[in-house]
Amino acid sequence: MEIHIDLTGTRGHRDAIYRQLRAAILAGRIRPGEALPPTRELAQRLAVSRTTVSAAYDRLTAEGFLAGRVGAGTFVTASPAERPSPVPDGPGVQPLPEWDAVPPPPAPFAPAPEFDFRPGVPDLSLFPFDTWRRLITQRLRAGQADLMTYGDPQGHPALREEIARHVGVSRDVRASAAQVVVTAGAQQTTDLVARVLLREGDLAAVEDPGYPPPRLVLAARGVRVAPVPVDASGIVVEAIPAGTRLVYVTPSHQYPLGLSMSLDRRLELLDWAERNDAVLVEDDYDTEFRYTGRPLEPLHSLDSRGRVVYVGSFSKVLSPALRLGFLIAPPSLVPALVKARYLTDWHAPNVEQAALAAFMAEGGFARHVRRMRKVYRARHELLVRGLASFADVLTPLPSSAGLHLSAVAANDCGPLVRAARRRGVRLYSLGDFGVGERRHGLVFGYGAVAAERIEPGLARLRALADEGAV
């Protein structure tokens, strides 16, 4: 029997041999009962090592396509008719219809644009790689074998201690390690809180405009989600619908407008939560980076009735790839939240948790925050100055923290955003974050764009605006 295998232009010879033999069997070109050439013979014919051919045969054998007979050779075991097509003939199992409304996740490996003004992304080129490599290596030594088994759903004890200490010093959030639950970030926190407090059909409220993922998480769980407008003082409390059981807010640095909720509005919101027996999910996602004055007190530090779940993340400070965040909950909620975490994905990665705990304990985290605050402050100032050339079309909103700022416009900025992306400038329209009344404007992130790229990036955007893209 003649077998035709073409390795021209291929790099992974083992995979190419496997794929072509498998395709030949499925197409019926090699029939059940036929013998394949000995591995030595086929290797010589293809000018590859015998190990390469053996590996391809072994994979086909493991998948049931081939069987070896001692002293006789290797034979095809099944006909194509006995194997299902990789593409089903019918529609297949269908998800619940509400998933049709959930947008697909962004492409994670899209080519980086020339000018990247994405919001919420830190400068990963300044990640402390050498220190992190040392900490991870230390935790992977034989003496740390306990980190390689199942962990505590609430989080690594040392990390919870460090988180409680850090937020107490930096944000005046008074909590013990017993109130900390390590999570993968704000989306998982919202999901966990919804699991333990909300039933299908219950009502939740989100800021409008606001951060889309929590709204989508709640809707996917069958929760009714009401968008509530935001003014210069924060979420409009009187507009929260009656019967709302959960409110997701970003009071310290409203996403995406960048405003801070006033003290009066914070107190009004807390009073509303107590009167309506509701929970407030306070996402304090990036106020490690504040450039003027001391931040207003978080809702959590003003809460004396156990109504606030405080949410923090290491994605904006260190790296989104770590998938490490935390929540601080009232003691009455912690046991149920830990159970919910256990039932969903059990626990966060142990090695990374232990490394982060050590990084915080030895002062590396605080030093990194101080360093990055200076870097981002300089970029923030460059961006504010650069936007002065857009005074005829954009009005920057006041913002003194975080990794982004927004500017409002009189007209829809969607066409400008699309034109900019075609010309290597990535940014977002303010309208992308609205649910009800969509505001016109742009959202500029400055974490992922180097300082020297801000001015030329804005110049290209200015040229597009002059061409009539907005």
Image (cartoon, grey):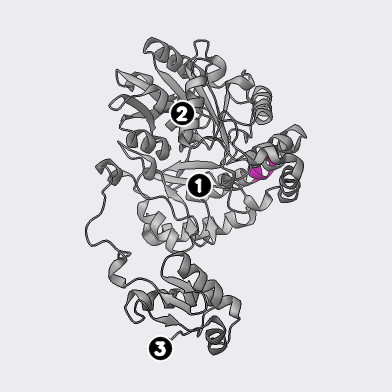
Circle 3 crowding by C-alpha within 10 Å: few under 14, some 14–19, many from 20: few
Q: Which residue is mark 1?
A: 444
Type of secondary structure dominating the magenta stretch = helix
Q: Residues within 10 Å of mark 1 (few under 14, many from 20)?
A: many
**Mark 2 or 1 closer to N-term?**
2
Task: Find disc 3 in the rendering and name its residue.
Answer: 1
* Res. 254 visible in picture: no
> Element type at marker 3?
loop
x, y (%) of residue 154? Answer: 57, 28
Q: Position of residue 121 (x, y in %)?
A: 55, 47
Q: Amino acid at mark 3?
A: Met
- Examine the structure image and report whether residue 108 is included in the region drawn in magenta: no
Q: Which residue shows up at 75% across the image and 32% down it?
A: 361
The relative height of residue 239 versus residue 355 in the rendered view (above or below) is above
Task: Say which of marks 2 and 3 sits in front.
Answer: 3
Q: Is residue 75 left or right of residue 28?
A: right
Q: Magenta includes 376? A: yes
Choose the circle earlier in sequence order: 1 or 3.
3
Location of residue 439 (image quadrant): top left
Residue 446 vs 461, above or below: the answer is above
Q: Residues within 10 Å of mark 2 (few under 14, many from 20)?
A: many
Q: Quadrant of the C terminus?
A: bottom left
Q: Residue 189 in the image: x percent, y percent?
A: 48, 31
Q: Amino acid at mark 2?
A: Ala
Disc 2 designates what residue? 340
Amino acid at pointer 1: Phe
Q: Which residues are magenta?
A: 373-378
Quadrant in which the N terminus appears: bottom left
In the rendering, which numbered label is found on residue 424?
none
Which numbered disc, 2 or 1, marks the residue closer to the eye? 2
In the rendered structure, are the residues bearing label 2 and label 1 in contact, judged by CB atoms less than 8 Å apart? no
